[in-house]
Image (cartoon, rainbow, N blue to C red):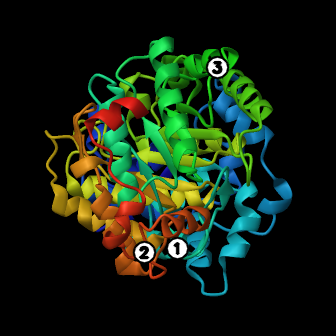
Amino acid sequence: MFTCSIAGRSYGFGSLKELMAKASPLRSGDQLAGIAARSAEERVAAQLLLSEVPLQRFLEDLLIPYEEDEVSRLVIDTHDAKAFSHISGLSVGEFRDWLLSESVSGDVLTRIAGGLTPEMVAAVSKIMRIQDLVYVASKVRVVTAFRNTIGLPGTMAARLQPNHPTDDPAGITASTLDGLMYGSGDACIGINPATDNITAVMALLQVLDDLRQRYEIPTQSCVLTHVTTTMEAMRRGAPVDLVFQSIAGTEAANASFGITLAMLEEARGMALELKRGTVGDNVMYFETGQGSALSANAHHGVDQQTVEARAYAVARHFKPLLVNTVVGFIGPEYLYDAKQIIRAGLEDHFCGKLLGLPMGVDVCYTNHAEADQDDMDTLLTLLGVAGCNYIMGIPGADDIMLNYQSTSFHDALYIRRQLGLTPAPEFMEWLQKVGIMTEESGLALPGLERLPLPDKQTLHALA
């Protein structure tokens, strides 16, 4: 039992799980689940008590029992006790102060990442303000590689997302070339297919690979289909670079996605055997989002932000090239408005970075949320300052297949220019080589004739 008194009123919390939920900043999803604090005062009481909890307790008092959940078992079985020993004597509040210390560098945070559990980083994020989340995350660089190198200091990548409502190859090719002209595509060129049909998926993989080879683009492609479909595509000889899967923070939520940890391990092994990477072998791509476990009634009474952090423990185990939270995509039932979306995006990025992940964020919202593109500009800018590895690049910021609002090719240009960032180095070299960008990382519009936009006939030939 955790108890305290504020202004003469006593507050009690019966378990660490309840304390974590009540300490979490306001979320419509936690309200929907019936686990949110009933007042701001109760939330402050929970945050004060949480700050006093020793980090060691999270290894002993599991929010989801070890025997009931394979994610809990993964967290405990892979915990690096030696790395944890550097901070094992700290409470949550002391851990916050330590993270904010100027003497704690990114290298130090990288060394302790294996000793942190998702619950520890989720707990400390709950007592941090926006600038704390930005500052600490900005210290950490997580570098991964496949055909280019992502996450280096001074860079920000963009996933080129050329989705099409009918998976039309010509439309996808046109959007891809459009994005390349604006310097997007170094994180990957990744299509969310309209269907999970294996034949259609293999056709899209071939379209992307042909385009990549035609223009000798140092990037990686991905069709974001179910992992089992990608595995079948690999068995049939399709040109698979990255294996994608949506993941969550509990075994039951992952089961609702039709996956297990063993399945992800098998898929990773298959992709590694293809040896398609040229500068690295990070072959996995994961997407997450606060609220997915609650949607599946698989949250075990744990608050949605903590469950989200547990998904990062799953991702970390498979050494991914890319991980991103699709922060506002699930809808206002879980993140009601811009204030909640902005806070959640920064929390997710912070927690992922502390756990050692190459975190990106899909800066996005659905059309029925209390948010607009101005709010996304705010989150995008904050993430740029926080050192986010990559964002999305979507024609006009409007995904015509998934029907949600995200960031555009122009948004990627804005944040790079504003903060003096460049694309991944190998990709940047290619952009300069073909005349799309200058050495100052600006668009070289007069040079576009070196990579001309194809006419309709050429588009269909490419597709």
**How far from the left and from the top, in percent, is residue 267?**
69, 26
Of residues 210 and 18, the one drawn nearer to the viewer in this rendering: 210
- Residue 251 at least partly seen: yes
State whether residue 396 is above or below residue 418. Answer: above
Q: Which residue is mark 1?
A: 138
Q: Residue at x 29, y 31 (%)?
A: 164
SS assignment at label 1: helix
Circles 3, 2 touching at the beta carbon (< 8 Å)? no
Q: Amino acid at mark 2?
A: Val
Q: Residue at x 34, y 22 (%)?
A: 194
Give the CA distance from mark 3 to mark 2: 37 Å
**How far from the left and from the top, in percent, is residue 446?**
32, 72
Disc marking residue 385: 2
Q: Residue at x 61, y 63 (%)?
A: 426
**How far from the left and from the top, in percent, is residue 352?**
56, 54
Q: Tell me the crowding category of disc 2: few under 14, some 14 to 19, or many 20 or more residues within 10 angstroms, Cα based.
A: some
Q: Earlier in the sequence, mark 1 or mark 3?
A: 1
Of residues 129 and 266, the one drawn nearer to the viewer in this rendering: 266
Circles 2, 1 touching at the beta carbon (< 8 Å)? yes
SS assignment at label 3: helix
**How far from the left and from the top, in percent, is residue 435?**
44, 68
Give the CA distance from mark 2 to mark 1: 7 Å
Q: Which residue is mark 3?
A: 231
Give the CA distance from mark 1 to mark 3: 36 Å
Q: Amino acid at mark 1?
A: Ser
Question: Relative to residue 140, is residue 12 drawn left or right?
Answer: left
Indicate the quadrant where residue 133 lies. bottom left
Q: Residue at x 49, y 80 (%)?
A: 439
State whether residue 179 is above or below residue 346. Answer: above
